[in-house]
Image (cartoon, coloured by chain):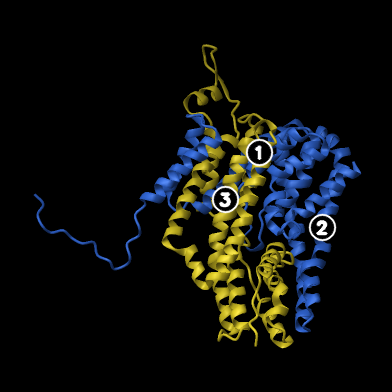
Chain colours: A yellow, B blue
Amino acid sequence: MEPRKLSRQDLRRCWRSWMMYNLSSMSFERLASFGFCLSMLPVARKLYPDLQQRKEMLKRHASFYNTEPQIGAIVNGMVLGLEEKRANGEPIDGETINTLKVGLMGPVAGIGDSMIPGMLIPILLSIGMALAAGGSILGPLFYTVAWLGIILPGTWFLFLKGYHMGSTSVEMLVSSKSTRLREALSLLGVFVMGGVAASYVRLGTGMEFVTRDGVNIQLQPMLDGIFPQLLPLMVVIGTWYLMAKRGLSPVKAMLLLLVVAATGVAIGLFTG
Amino acid sequence: MAFEATLIGILCYLGALSSPWLLGVTGGWYLLSRPLVSGMLVGLILGDMQSGILIGVAVQAVYIAMVTPGGSMPADLNFVAYPAIALGILSGKGPEVAVALAATIGIAGTVLFNLMLVLNSWWNHRADVALENGNERGIYLNSAIWPQASLFLMRFVPTFIAVYFGAQYINVVMDSLPKMVLSTMNVLGGILPAVGIAILLKQIIKRYSMLIYFLVGFICIVFLKLNMVALVIVGALLALIHYNYKPEPQPAGATVPVDDKDEF
């Protein structure tokens, strides 16, 4: 039997198929499962010319699957490498491949969610928002270029790493060095959020007092003299406390802020 | 306005979470559906790019850290990014009011998002049947192509209606609102970004001590008057120091060698 070798073009087609369709048919009970199946489809015929085997393989990859799509490209690469080996007669059974996939999707989703939407995107957006000050087009353009410039080569690299290194490639993601790197990045994320809070949360009070001698004291300029942006800081810390420690959902937090804003306006505490 | 509404409707569909055409979430959800980017595009289409970007930035602050874990969403960012920002620009009431408007539409939009997930179950079922019959074309069509038809309708139609009719009536509606409501929207728009920031902090901060970095970042802006680019650089250097000097965790069971010689 001549070896069934995947070309670089095959790999690229599988990567592109995953990147495009990972959530294209998402539903509550299947999420990315057909996305994974579609990423195997371009090479299915090449790896398993036999219909029965091919059906088995596609079925294996249509089982429940859900992970963070960008970092998750590494799992697709890995599975593709294993399927290629299996198709060439190595003793890897389908159950092993499936177990590996299912075992990885949780940890990879955890790392991916905290790295991509939890870290990379907020940091790039913060820079983009700052560059967009005054309505400058530079901000959106920066975000577009930086995001695509990082994520396109990045996912392709992870996909290839998974394909070439197999299950050892995941160690790259969970090693103590990468844990430390993630910690350092989360520190950067928190730090930048401090800046975002200071720049984009706005709240001022219109409270005034008139003393007995007829001196008009305005509260806001006084506060600004002591600690500028003190009220926004209190709102952010308060919201964080209620959400993190009291389990308030984002929607409820928004409603709570609505109540705060309406009450504040009604009693003349806040100026809008 | 029909032409503009059509363009915005198409962009809205392209940026939807499960639209595959721009390499999936890479070019869609994480790029086109970021209010920072959509503000620019919608502004460009409606002929006022500058206020589009300003509104985009203000709205972006609320949704800076919206994570979509396993299909449950606190707000439909796609509807925030297109119809809501378009209405915000058309109303001409400034970024804060646009933020309050966007947050409302975002929460309402989750209904359609959940409807899509339910409809896709049906397409999933058809793909399963195709799989059972070994029909590869059927798998492809039922999981890559047909679900897009229902998605397109759910994204394009509401956006088109919102922009087309919004352009005519948003001003009337806005002007008929009592002053109190507008002031509340203004204040609310100013404090809503706190939710976005809190979502991110909740994820990252594991110990109270990490809150220090948040406060340092805050103080760098309000007292030291750094701009955001400088802030990111300072933060990156702090992160680098942390990376280099954080001690490796001791392997479990390893004993620290005790130096019991007297040191003189």
Asked whether the residues under marks 2 and 3 belong to the same chain, the reply is no
- Residue B95 visible in the current orientation: yes
Marks 1 & 2 on one chain:
no
Q: Amino acid at mark 3?
A: Leu
- Residue B191, given in percent of the width and then of the height, sits at 62, 38
- Marked residue chain, label 3: A
Q: Residue at 63%, 49% (x, y): give it.
A: A147
The three-letter code of the residue at mark 2 reads: Met
Gap in angstroms between the C-alphas marked 1 and 2: 30 Å
Residue A127, placed above or below residue B23:
above
Q: Chain of mark 1?
A: A
Residue under label 1: A139
Question: Which residue was labeled with disc 3?
Answer: A120
Q: Is residue B107 above or below residue B139?
A: above
**Residue displayed at 68% across by 80% down:** A47
Residue neighbourhood size for the residue with mark 2, other residues' Cα within 10 Å, grouped as few (<14), some (14–19), many (≥20):
some
Label 2 vs label 3, nearer the camera: 3
Indicate the quadrant containing the N terminus of chain A: top left, top right, bottom left or bottom right: bottom right
- Secondary structure under tag 2 reads helix
Gap in Å between the C-alphas at discs 2 and 3? 30 Å
Q: Nearer the viewer, residue A160 or A146?
A: A160
Q: What amino acid type is highlighted by mark number 1?
A: Gly
First in sequence: mark 3 vs mark 1: 3
Q: Are marks 3 and 1 on the same chain?
A: yes
Q: Which mark is residue B154?
A: 2
Q: Farthest residue to the front: give it.
A: A2
Q: Picture coordinates of residue B129 (x, y %)?
A: 78, 80
